[in-house]
Image (tube, grey):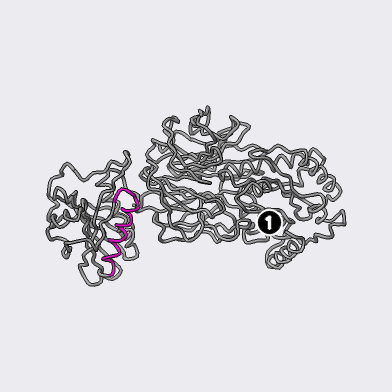
């Protein structure tokens, strides 16, 4: 019973055929229903991983700490810290003394092991339901290079999260954003990318040209963004693997901005402003074919595709104030879906297809909210002086966005779709316009 | 910004541009990125120019300080005010007498809106100002529009005072045409 997945060129995952791996799948009492909003987080323990050789020792605790931070940051789990542990995990394959974990009220126990040889490392983990005294699912093993050790901890976290919540994970994913510095009247804005937890920040542009509004492709390899490098807003397409970059979607005399990939990555939809009017256009990258999607004498911007690629939601002020509309992906009749108080903008379709996140301005306040795709069941998740630019976690359960305190600098925050667990996402300085990429393979 | 510091900025820009390939495109004193700072466009060279004495009615300094190089808008609006039309009419007279200059019409928004919408709104404002200049006889061929949305405030404070002066269209005098 060995299954092999290609992850990174250097990262390989196999099922561990451990001593409990042959247990039949049980009904799982270790379960959290995210959609109901978790008020009492599930207590878990993740002791330092067992070093299976001396070189693995330096990662033993760090791996466990990354897993603990990931789970704690969801707000769904609460760590029982190592100082409180009674039992010591000294062997990955030794049987678990459940009573020692029950005694400190742990419900989910995660054990792991790590070995390192040269620049190669192997990480294993198991998840146990302490209350029923059973392992949950098979053990898993990840092999890769030592410089991807955080990714292996994220893979462990994703597996644990998925097994307990029944939802996809989102820890092994990256976020592209704009890193800001300097005075606000002459801001330096650089395109950057980082892990979802704020680690491994890389800068992708040098800050000479103003850049805004990046979007990551569904494959995670390419980024679209708006750049002022030629003096007027233009759309740049960057391949983060090869470093290749090109300007796309030129419309003479127009400001072009607000680019979004089609779900298959083969094209984009974007805004072009000319003569006081802003319309949406669609460009097929392979052929260069351009199609105008809207022709209303008003602003149409902030487009977002439904995950199946059949529809585009966007914002328009054709009614007098900015509101959210949905139209077929090839253009045509648009239907307004936002009818609450105030102005609605920056719609972003959930990767699950069920919800649209948006920014709402009302009575001098800004909100991030979600609504169903027919506009019903509007739910505001945040309220502040200035919140905007929501982006979805790959599992559609968490939204990251830009928050600017009054008189302060912008930062990235995340909140879950029940409105709980508002958290600041660490960045090297002021940051804005996040775009959350897919789970990495 | 005072004239002195503006002049210094331009001199600094000239020094930086010396190793580039100068061409028309730099602007005098627009509120936005204009090729001088590290946020300007990368390859826009800077033309040599002298702001001159504001008492000289043919000087760029006169255009900026005596006539006024910008007009302001109310919230979420691109309609010109009476004051704005008067300023633009005076700008048009100057531009029609000083035909050697091209113009970058910058559109800006305050920070109380979302980024993409504000780029669209800034373009609307710049276009409204440009169309008014055209109606006063300034050739559209001398002008190009750039919208910075909310990302180039002339002054940054989280208060009405700043938002009011950031909702603007700036007629930035660019290089000598031709």
Find out whether residue B48 is within the magenta segment. no
Find out whether residue A76 is within the magenta segment. yes
Q: Using the rendered image of the protein, determine whether residue B178 is visible from the camera's viewpoint.
A: no
| Label 1: element kind | loop
Which residue: 62% across, 34% down? Answer: A298
> What chain letter is assigned to the residue under label 1?
B
Residue A64 percent coordinates (x, y)? 27, 61
Boundaries of the magenta span: A58-77
Q: Dot 1, crowdedness within 10 Å: few (<14), some or many (≥20)? A: many
Left or right: A381, with A322 as reference point? left
Q: Quadrant of the N terminus of chain B?
A: bottom right
Left or right: A119, with A21 as reference point? right
Residue A299 percent coordinates (x, y)? 60, 36
Looking at the rendered structure, the number of numbered marks drawn on it comes to 1
**Vertical arrangement, residue A186 with respect to residue A394, above or below:** below
Q: Using the rendered image of the protein, determine whether residue B158 is visible from the camera's viewpoint.
A: yes
Residue A274 percent coordinates (x, y)? 65, 40
Query: Which residue carries the number 1 mark?
Result: B34
Residue A399 percent coordinates (x, y)? 42, 45
The chief SS type of the magenta part is: helix
Q: Residue furthest bottom?
A: A54
In the foreground, A406 or A163: A406
């Amino acid at each position: 019973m060995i299954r092999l997945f290609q992850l990174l060129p250097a990262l390989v995952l196999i099922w561990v055929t451990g001593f409990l791996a042959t247990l039949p799948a049980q009904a799982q009492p270790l379960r959290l229903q995210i959609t109901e909003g978790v008020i009492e987080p599930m207590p878990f323990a993740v002791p330092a991983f067992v070093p299976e050789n001396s070189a693995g020792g330096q990662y033993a605790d760090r791996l466990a700490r990354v897993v603990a931070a990931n789970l704690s940051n969801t707000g769904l789990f609460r760590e029982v810290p190592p100082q409180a542990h009674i039992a010591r995990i000294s062997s990955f394959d030794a049987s678990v003394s459940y009573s020692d974990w029950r005694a400190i009220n742990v419900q989910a126990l995660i054990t792991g092991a790590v070995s390192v040889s040269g620049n190669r490392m192997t990480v294993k983990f198991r998840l146990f339901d302490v209350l029923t005294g059973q392992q949950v699912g098979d053990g898993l093993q990840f092999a890769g290079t030592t410089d991807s050790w955080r990714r292996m901890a994220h893979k462990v976290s994703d597996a644990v999260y998925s097994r307990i919540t029944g939802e996809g994970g989102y820890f092994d994913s990256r976020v592209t954003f704009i890193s800001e510095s300097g005075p606000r009247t002459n801001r330096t804005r650089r395109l950057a990318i980082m892990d979802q937890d704020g680690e491994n920040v890389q800068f992708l542009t040098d800050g000479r040209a103003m850049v805004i509004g990046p979007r990551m492709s569904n494959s995670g390899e390419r980024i679209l963004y708006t750049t002022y490098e030629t003096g007027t807003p233009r759309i740049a397409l960057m391949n983060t693997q090869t470093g290749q970059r090109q300007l796309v979607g030129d419309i003479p005399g127009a400001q072009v901005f607000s680019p979004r990939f089609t779900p298959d990555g083969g094209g984009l939809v974007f805004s072009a402003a000319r003569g006081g009017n802003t319309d949406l256009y669609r460009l097929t990258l392979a052929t260069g074919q351009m199609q105008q999607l809207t022709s209303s004498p008003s602003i149409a911007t902030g487009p977002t595709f439904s995950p199946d690629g059949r529809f585009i939601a966007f914002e328009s002020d054709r009614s007098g104030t900015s509101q959210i509309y949905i139209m077929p992906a090839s253009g045509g009749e648009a239907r307004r879906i936002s009818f609450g108080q105030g102005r609605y903008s920056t719609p972003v379709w959930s990767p699950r297809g069920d919800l649209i996140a948006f920014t709402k301005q009302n009575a001098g306040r800004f909100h991030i909210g979600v609504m169903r795709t027919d506009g019903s069941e509007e739910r505001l998740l945040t309220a502040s002086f200035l919140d905007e630019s929501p982006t979805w976690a790959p599992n559609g359960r968490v939204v990251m966005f830009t928050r600017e305190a009054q008189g302060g600098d912008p930062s990235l925050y995340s909140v879950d779709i029940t409105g709980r667990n508002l958290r600041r996402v660490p960045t090297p300085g002021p940051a804005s316009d996040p775009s959350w990429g897919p789970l990495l393979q | 910004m005072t004239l002195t510091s503006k002049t210094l900025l331009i001199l600094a820009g000239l020094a930086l541009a010396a190793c580039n390939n100068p061409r028309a495109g730099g602007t005098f004193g627009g509120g936005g990125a204009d090729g001088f700072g590290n946020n300007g466009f990368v390859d826009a060279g800077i033309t040599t120019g002298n702001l001159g004495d504001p008492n000289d009615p043919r000087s760029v300094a006169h255009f900026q300080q005596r006539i006024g190089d910008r007009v302001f808008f109310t919230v979420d609006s691109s309609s010109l005010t009476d004051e704005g039309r008067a300023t633009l009419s005076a700008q048009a007279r100057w531009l029609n007498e000083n035909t050697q200059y091209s113009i970058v019409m910058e559109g800006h928004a305050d920070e109380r809106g979302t980024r993409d919408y504000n780029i669209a709104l800034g373009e609307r404002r710049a276009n409204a100002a440009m169309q008014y200049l055209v109606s006063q006889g300034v050739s559209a061929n001398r002008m190009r529009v750039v919208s910075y949305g909310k990302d180039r405030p002339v002054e940054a404070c989280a208060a009405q005072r700043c938002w009011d002066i950031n909702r603007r269209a700036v007629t930035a005098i660019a290089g000598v045409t031709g």
